[in-house]
Image (cartoon, rainbow, N blue to C red):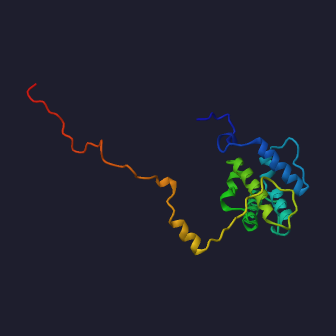
Amino acid sequence: MPGPSRPLWQISGKRDPVQEQEAQAWIEQVTGMKFPPGVPYEDVLRDGIILCNLMNRLAPGIIQKVNTSGGDYKMMDNLSQFQKACTKYGVPDVDLFQTTDLWDRKNIALVTTTIFALGRTCYKHPEWRGPYLGPKPSEENKREFSEQQLRAGEAIIGLQAGQNRGASQSGQNFGASRKIILGK
């Protein structure tokens, strides 16, 4: 059990400072907004303003209104709008962080994963000329086989099946009796 002196972010989700720096650099390149020096990465992202601006740079107008002032509710709304925009842009649901992951600093590693997923999704948008984040996703390589080719494949016995030449039941001792010695 971790001691009470350790911050919550060190307990859940293994953070990778190198990935966080890459994500930050990419966000700064795309948005043209610099993170304030000395402010932790998650604190800069927490109000959702930079994330919403990032989405609007990737897909202009995808988020209609970015809340720049107001209470916590407005800032949490930014995060929700960012997540909806990610889904609309094509980021898989499994890669999205929950609002509480960032707002309550529960899982900052997942926030970074979402940013990388968004960076990879950019490759699927030909209108986006870069910069990109992360490796280019592999593309589907669909193959068409004729009925004849499929039938030919059914006749082949794969090597995993092995062979049963020389198989016999010798050496097996089903029903071999036990020697019981009485009177000892």
Farthest-out residue, top = 184
Along the line of sight, which residue is nearer the eye, 49 or 115? 115
Q: Residue at x 18, y 39 (%)?
A: 177
Question: Considering the image in quadrants, where does the N terminus appear?
Answer: top right
Q: Position of residue 64 (x, y in %)?
A: 82, 69
Q: Quadrant of residue 63?
A: bottom right
Res. 61 in view: yes
Farthest-out residue, right = 32
Q: Is residue 75 above or below residue 172?
A: below
Q: Residue at x 14, y 33 (%)?
A: 180
Q: Is residue 182 above or below residue 116?
A: above
Along the line of sight, which residue is nearer the eye, 167 or 76? 167
Q: Residue at x 67, y 34 (%)?
A: 5
Farthest-out residue, left = 183
Q: Position of residue 158 (x, y in %)?
A: 51, 57
Q: Is residue 63 above or below residue 37?
A: below
